[in-house]
Amino acid sequence: MLNDADQTFPEIREAVRRLCARFPGPYWRALDRERAYPTEFVAALTEAGFLSVLIPEDYGGSGLGLSAGAAVLEEIHRSGGNGGACHAQMYTMGVVLRYGSPAQKAAYLPKVASGELRLQAFGVTEPDAGTDTTRITTFARREGEAYVVNGKKLWISRAEHSDLMVLLCRTAPRAEAAKPSDGMSVLLVDMRQAVGNGLTIRPVRTMLNHATTELFFEDLKVPVANLIGQEGQGFRYILDGMNAERILIAAECIGDAKFFIDRASAYAKAREVFGRPIGQNQGVQFPIARAYVQMTAANLMVEHAAALFEAGRPCGTEANMAKLTASEASWCAADMALQTHGGFGFAEDYDIERKFRETRLYQVAPISTNLILSHVATHVLELPKSF
Ligand SMILES: Cc1cc2nc3c(=O)[nH]c(=O)nc-3n(C[C@H](O)[C@H](O)[C@H](O)COP(=O)(O)OP(=O)(O)OC[C@H]3O[C@@H](n4cnc5c(N)ncnc54)[C@H](O)[C@@H]3O)c2cc1C
């Protein structure tokens, strides 16, 4: 095991570890085979209050900062589990908390905090608009006291396991808006009423167990009362949430990297080839040590970005850099762990191949590595823009 002496939130981490011990490898492997949702795990986390750590105490949460949420997710991933099934319950509410009306906050946040309402679907990406969000075309047309929504979304995770969804859609065509990022709005969609009444959900099977889906909107009516903030300003509202998401997912990558390093170190000490432990060979030791160095450096970046977020300071660049360094550290650690395990790394029973598939996602979602590099190149280094 790694040296954890200086870790943040030791009590929270210990409690999360204890909870995760009830959901060991065989639990996740069985779900992975069926691409099934970890209902019992999510219920246990909800009951223990770990998904409401970021909700202010006034609304029934623990009122802790982002780094507490990061500690929870890191430990879930380090244990061999996966927070992807529920991490959005922690941060999707942020758009309601920051930009919702007092009535919306009072109506939703206490129920999200208790777990009575699952607010963990975040609908942004479309088949023809991934990275370039301003190209979304899902449109909400106002008719009296309702918006009528038409369009399509893709890769919307946990839609089947959510009572509410934060939906980004156009309320003015891109061509008519002053700026491409104007004319988008955020609607809170009640999935319980929407499904079958203008919203169809189709699951998309992927290389990892992620409960992701495609959504089809055909004249779905959403009450105007469910508009968050001002019409046309939605893009701005979701940006804060995206920073939180990137930092928390970076923490999951740190957890993954620690999982791989723990497992590889233990295996390299135990596995004997040519009459000695494979870990005695520097050719095996050094990749493990390098993975540890990369993870430790990335972790500092994650802590820095989380501290800026908590202080209410601009952190877009740092959130992106945390996500990039952490996702690369977890991927290098995954590759190292597979190599260290030799043929056994490919066997399902060791959990290495499953976690290997799972951690690969983070270089594409929620934002791809190239787009982060482009942000740093043009916004920080002031190199000429390529798009
Ligand atoms: C399992 C999964 C779950 C997801 N969950 C959600 C969710 O819950 N909600 C949601 O809204 N979205 C979700 N997404 C979508 C995710 O955020 C997008 O896949 C991601 O933002 C990339 O968009 P894209 O797939 O359209 O890639 P594209 O935008 O088509 O890009 C394809 C590739 O080209 C590269 N590229 C594009 N333009 C440039 C450029 N100018 N310069 C250099 N490289 C470039 C990109 O880096 C990428 O590698 C999920 C995706 C997956 C796979």
Image (spheres, helix red, strand yellow):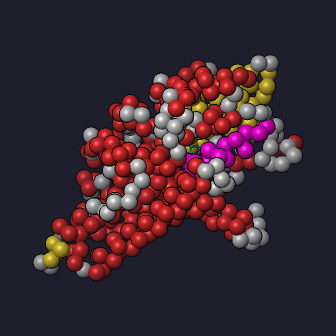
Residue 32 % position (x, y): 35, 44
Q: Give the main secondary structure of the magenta stretch.
A: helix
- Asked if the stretch drawn in magenta spans residue 58, the answer is no
Q: Nearer the viewer, residue 71 or 373?
A: 71
> In the rendered view, would you say 106 is above or below 276?
above
Residue 277 % position (x, y): 18, 74
* In this picture, residue 138 sits left or right of residue 115: right
In which quadrant of the rendered view does residue 270 lie? bottom left
Q: Is residue 330 left or right of residue 364?
A: left
Q: Is residue 109 left or right of residue 51?
A: right
Residue 239 in the magenta stretch? The answer is yes
Quarter where residue 98 is shown: top right
Task: Tell me if I can see residue 199 in this picture.
Answer: yes
In the image shown, does 23 or 339 lie closer to the viewer? Answer: 23
Quarter that holds the N terminus? bottom left
Q: Residue furthest bottom?
A: 282
At x 56% / y 54%, what residue is drawn? 307
What segment is highlighted magenta in the picture?
A: 232-246
Q: Image check: 354 left or right of 379?
A: left
What residue is rendered at 36% in x and 50% in y? Answer: 10
Question: Where in the figure is residue 264, as x and y percent of width and height?
Answer: 29, 65
Name the quarter where the C terminus is drawn. bottom right
In this rendered view, identify the residue nearer to me: 224 or 130.
224
Taking the image as drawn, is residue 32 in sight? no
**Image location (x, y in percent) of residue 237:** 70, 41
Q: Residue at x 58, y 62 (%)?
A: 321
Q: How many marks?
A: 0
Q: Look at 42% across and 38% down and name the residue there.
A: 50
